[in-house]
Amino acid sequence: MPRDDLTEVRYIRQASGVVPGSLSAHQMLGLRLVAGRPATRLLPADAMHQIKRWVSPVVAQASSRKSAMTPIKFILRYTAVPFMAIVAVVSWASLHSSAEIDARQYAALSGAYASFPVDLRRDIRQALQSGKLSKWDYSSLVRESLNDGVVLDWPSDDKEDVATEREKLAALVKADRP
């Protein structure tokens, strides 16, 4: 055989999982035909029938070596990984929204507290029961104030002390208690 045929035979043996030296020339030619490679010479019909009969178990054996998709593999590959990604994003979002608001947001609520309707003041009091306002609570309070026609104006100077601004709002809420 020419050199390129030897390389092709080795490739076909390796791809089909056949032990070297266990195939005759006719069987190798059949493997070449099954693998989609052109044959270099024609064979009689009975030889082709023999080759196909011998090659089909070899090809079936080579293709059966791939592991089947078990339910556990399917769940791990297509369900568990995306589920863990969703859980990670949801936990990050919940931690982010449960953080405390900054001093400027407390100052904005303190500045507009006198113009808030009674329902909004009650909602601020309920949100401050824990002692701090979360970003989640703040966003719902801002939405409610906008629905009531009150716009919050953030102070132009930079408020840096969150505890002081929180205490100012808490004092307003405490003084407003009925």
Image (cartoon, helix red, strand yellow):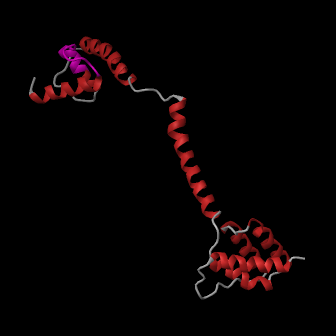
**Does 158 lie within the magenta span?**
no
Please state the horizontal and vertical placement of residue 22, each as a whole percent of the image: 22, 13
Image quarter for residue 10? Answer: top left
Where 130 sits versus 5, above or below?
below
Image quarter for residue 98? Answer: bottom right
The residue depicted at 21 percent of the width and 19 percent of the height is 28
| Image quadrant in which the C terminus is located | bottom right
Residue 110 visible in the picture: yes
Where 77 sits versus 1, above or below?
below
Residues 160 and 43: in front is 160
Please state the horizontal and vertical placement of residue 91, each as a whole percent of the image: 60, 54
The residue depicted at 78 percent of the width and 80 percent of the height is 172
State left or right for residue 131 relative to residue 56. Answer: right
Furthest-right residue in this view? 178
Furthest-bottom residue in this view? 156
Circle count: 0
Furthest-left residue in this view? 2
Residues 100 and 19: in front is 100
The residue depicted at 55 percent of the width and 36 percent of the height is 75
Please state the horizontal and vertical placement of residue 29, each as a whole percent of the image: 21, 20
Where 12 sits versus 142, above or below?
above
Where 129 sits versus 155, above or below?
above
State left or right for residue 34 relative to residue 141. Answer: left
Residues 160 and 42: in front is 160
State left or right for residue 9 relative to residue 88. Answer: left
The residue depicted at 80 percent of the width and 82 percent of the height is 116
> Which residues make up the magenta segment?
17-30
Residue 32 visible in the picture: no
Please state the horizontal and vertical placement of residue 40, each as a whole percent of the image: 16, 25
| Image quadrant in which the N terminus is located | top left
